[in-house]
Amino acid sequence: MGTQISIFIQQIINGLKIGSVYALVALGYTMVYGIIKLINFAHGDFIMVGSYVLLYTIPIMVAGGLPAWMAVILAILACSAVGITVEKVAYKPVREKGTKMSALITAIAMSLFLENLAQTLFGASPKSLSTIFNFPNLEVGSTKLNGNTLLTIAIGVAMMIALQLFVKKTKMGKAMRAVSEDGEAAILMGINKNRTISITFAIGSALAAVASLMYCASYPQATPTLGSMLGLKAFIAAVLGGIGIIPGAMLGGIIIGLVESLTKAYIGTLTGGVITSAFSDAIVFGILIIVLIVKPAGILGKNVGEKV
Amino acid sequence: MKRKMVKKLIALVSAGAMTMAMLAGCGSTSDGSTAETTAAADGDSIVVGVISPNTGNLATYGESVLNGINLAVEEINAAGGVLGKNISIISYDDKADSTEGANAFNRLAGEGACAIIGSVTSGVTASLAPLADESQIVMITPTATADTITESDNYVFRSCFKDSYQGKMAAKFAAEKLGVKKVAVLYASGDAYSAGVRESFDAACSEYGLEIVAEESSSSTDDTEFSSQLTNIAASGAEFLFAPYYYNAAGPYIIPQARAAGFEGVIMGADGFDGTTESMLDDKTIYNNCYYTNHYSPDDTSEVVQTFVTAYSGKYGAKPNALAALAYDCAYMVKDAIEKAGSTDRTAIRDAMSGMSFEGVTGKFVLDETGTPEKSVAVIEFKDGEAVWNCTLD
């Protein structure tokens, strides 16, 4: 029985490892949705952009005697540039002319565009990144807790708090909430709507760059499509927690990670081998359907009026 | 996917129509060899066609295959050729595309090729197989490993083993060389290659007295997180893990995550592990005690292999990979078949190749009734980040 319990704890830790990455990615989704009510389906691909920037800048950092993670600064700059460009070139014209639906479709188009652009620029074959952090495992009995996982959770919580403070306490955050609530009225109050939206995108993309650092620390390989499945699952995490709600993204990410890990670990024995661990993705997407039927606003989504 | 199907269909229909036209032109509807015999006699050489991807994403595959064939043909001609004639090669590019492949095939059939070596990928080769049967030309592929390739046709052969055969050889290696008893399996249920190899491994386990103590799966080979499955495997007490995945999952994810989950035993894969050395993490020691099966290894100490490696590196300045070795063997198989047939009649070559026994750089084998060899397999081991030949299993 003792070993059963320690395996269970290890499976929880496995869930936290991937869940903490989902949480970081989901923060970016929720941030952008909270302000302009656009589900930025290209967010996962911003992470892909970030991982390629890291791929090429980490060796430069290491050669210059700096720690490898400093490359994230360049990744943040590159991702923000890509994010703002995508917003100005693709989303803004559509937002001004079209409906919400056409904006959503534009986001999907941008996602495909970025994936194919990366495939043309970097080739389809996967490329390996060098080690970013060298943490020793934290061992308690027979369970091992990876340092990357702890750091990812810590960064996620820190960013969650910082974002919450930024949105609630600063002037810029107030402008964002105003734009989110009523764009036209915000303009009348002297708020530069386009600038506010640009900054929102810059922050969302910077979050993607940080997420790509932590993703690459745990999964050190860059491919043009790495953002697509990751993005979808983080999107489900954001919806589960309540899209637009910053702590909800964190909660949703961790829950999705745990569900994924525990289904992979136990569904085979529980169902006598009828449903195997290969079904874990189906179960995660099943959660999305259940959430949309039972509680479309998400776990933390009660006060619709104050969504940020 | 659908577009591909339509393309394939168009290719097949047009290819069929062209073949019929060609046969009608020869004044014979059943004996397709008429056109070829005259063409070969005119040129005073025996024409062998090659179809391979020479441009596009897989261009390196085509290059290796052509290098292997050209080296073999050079050697054959220098030693006096076949039936008193030199072999000449006509090579066409299929760009790893079924339609291009069908065009290449029909051109070669029209230009009097008595046999065709190709193609390289399983996808293109599978779509050419019906054409080979229709125009009754022997087509021998060096590298298409999908199980079904040679099954439903009479004119298609190969010099490589089929995917599922590797599962059997991995079980044999585990039982006979490593002497393990308890094994675990991790495979991608949504991938034909991974699931196929796993099935043959499972079947062979009972034959070799191996007990499967854990079997886990992922939905695809593109997954990045296998820790949950590997934690269960580590806890199952298995001494050996069979994980038929590709290098892009093995290098950065499966092997490091297995070690992190506390699995210290042997990890083994199939030829999909080829290339793992390129995708390894910085700590190379975690890859020790990992093996995979492959068609051949240039480090194999046997004399045939070393002679081939020397000749190849002398000509091209690089060590031959498995594709070059398999293609080299293909060319010699065609030569043997023509010699045995005593003519360049396409049907006679088929009869000669069917069930032939052959010894080459990729092993000693007999073609089974479908045209696929049951042959020796090279086992490669990772040692501090290098892929090193371990042994060759018969």
Image (spheres, rainbow, N blue to C red):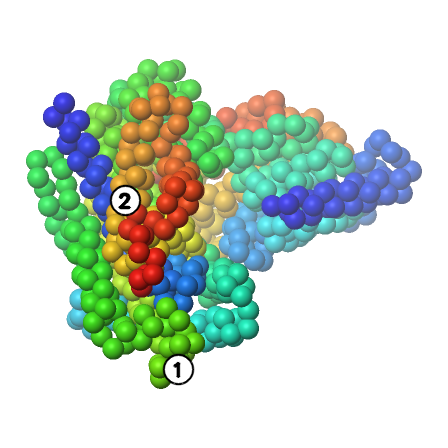
Q: Hey, what amino acid is under mark 1? A: Leu
Of callouts 1 and 2, the N-terminal one: 1
Disc 2 packing (10 Å; few <14; some 14–19; many ≥20): many
Give A120 or B340, whichever is nearer the viewer.
A120
* The quadrant where residue B285 appears: top left
Compared across the picture, whether B3 is left or right of A54 comes to: right
As rendered, which of B367 and B268 lies closer to the eye?
B268
Q: Residue at x 67, y 51 (%)?
A: B100
Q: Secondary structure at mark 2?
A: helix
Q: Return the chain for callout 1.
A: A
Q: Which mark is residue A66?
A: none
Q: Residue at x 30, y 47 (%)?
A: A299
Residue B222's quadrant in the figure?
top left
Residue A115 in sight in this render: yes
- Does label 2 lie on the same chain as label 1? yes
Q: Measuring from the top left, give residue A125's x and y in whole percent.
A: 43, 55
Left or right side of B256 for A112: right
Mark 1 sits on what residue? A188
Chain to which mark 2 belongs: A
**Which residue appears at 27% of the width and 41% of the height?**
A258
Q: Position of residue B237 (x, y in %)?
A: 21, 25
Question: What is the spatial separation of the Cα atoms under label 1 and label 2, in whole angstroms?
Answer: 41 Å
Q: Is residue A63 visible?
A: no
Location of the N terminus of chain A (image quadrant): top left
* Residue matched to label 2: A255
Please name which of the two marks, 1 or 2, marks the residue nearer to the observer: 1
Give B89 or B218, whichever is nearer the viewer: B218
What kind of residue is marked 2?
A: Ile
Q: What element does badge 1 sit on?
A: helix
